[in-house]
Amino acid sequence: MQGTQLRSERFEARLRPEDKALMQRAADLSGRKLSEYVIASAREAAVRTIRQFEGMVLSEPRDQEAFAMALLQPPAPGRRLKAAARRYRSMPQP
């Protein structure tokens, strides 16, 4: 559905001539208009950045095991967590 939505937003940017020339060359090589190339590239970079900050990668086996154990055998709730749960339960419900 992304391709069928009306593109109604505008975005402007000032850039150095050499940056525009670089982007134009890349756009030409990929067979796209400059604006199409810039929008696609910015979108890819935005998605990558969001994934980087919202996701979690456990590449070390030790980290994977620690995460799994925390899910399977969570530690007992501490004093402060128990107090917070009591306060929450005593709040009036809507």
Image (cartoon, rainbow, N blue to C red):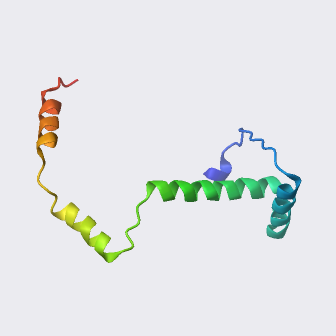
Quadrant, the C terminus: top left
Residue placed at 48% from the left, 55% from the top?
A: 53
Q: Is residue 81 or residue 88 the one in the foreground? A: 81
Regarding residue 33, the answer to whether it shows in the image is: no
Percent coordinates x, y for residue 90 in the rendering: 12, 27
Q: Is residue 68 or residue 7 the one in the foreground? A: 68
Vertical relation: 93 (above or below) 38: above
Percent coordinates x, y for residue 21 in the rendering: 87, 59
Q: Quadrant of residue 49?
A: bottom right
Is residue 47 shown left or right of residue 32? left
Percent coordinates x, y for residue 10 in the rendering: 74, 39
Is residue 57 shown left or right of residue 8? left
Residue placed at 83% from the left, 70% from the top?
A: 29
Vertical relation: 6 (above or below) 88: below
Is residue 45 shown left or right of residue 68? right
Vertical relation: 61 (above or below) 93: below
Percent coordinates x, y for residue 56 in the rendering: 40, 61
Residue placed at 17% from the left, 36% from the top?
A: 84
Is residue 67 shown left or right of residue 16? left
Furthest-bottom residue in this view: 61
Residue placed at 12% from the left, 36% from the top?
A: 83
Regarding residue 26, the answer to whether it shows in the image is: yes
**Count of marks, rendered view:** 0
